[in-house]
Amino acid sequence: MKNSKFIIDKFAKLIEQGLITSKDLSSEILNIFKSKRDEFVFKMKLTSKDEFDILSKRLENLENKISKLEKKKKKSRSAKRS
């Protein structure tokens, strides 16, 4: 119940701040979930703080590479259709 209240409060703050576009809203939701994931993993003490930071950075780099490849793939598909 506490976690759902936290998420609802975050959504309410977003609406109050006037984030209207879906892109802003979706990126903010992803940031909320990422922070909750990081908090959960850190509380479980699965890794040390230093190792956790390194793994988080590696994960972020991989996510960026995947998004770049997906964009490149979309561009190549649209070029073929033209």
Image (cartoon, rainbow, N blue to C red):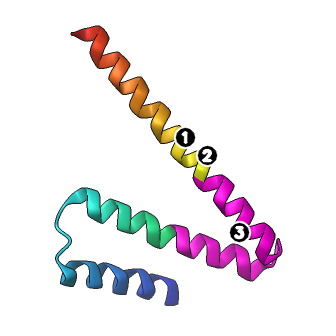
Which amino acid type is shown beneath numbered disc 1? Lys
Near mark 1 (Cα within 10 A), the count class, few <14, some 14-19 or many ≥20, is: few
Instruction: Name the residue carrying label 1.
Output: 65
The quarter of the image holding the C terminus is: top left
Instruction: Name the residue carrying label 3.
Output: 53
At x 20%, y 71%, the residue is 19
At x 80%, y 68%, the residue is 51
Where residue 14 sits in the image (x, y, percent)?
27, 78
| Residue 1 shows in this picture | no
| Residue 4 shows in this picture | yes
Distance in Å between CA atoms under marks 3 and 1? 18 Å
**Residue 55 painted magenta:** yes
In this view, the residue in front, 6 or 22, is: 22
Tell me where residue 37 sits by quadrant. bottom right
Where residue 6 sits in the image (x, y, percent)?
44, 86
- Counting every numbered tag in the picture gives 3
Query: Which residue range is magenta in the image?
Result: 34-60
Tell me where residue 30 sits by quadrant. bottom left
Q: Secondary structure at mark 1?
A: helix
Query: On residue 62, which mark appears?
Result: 2
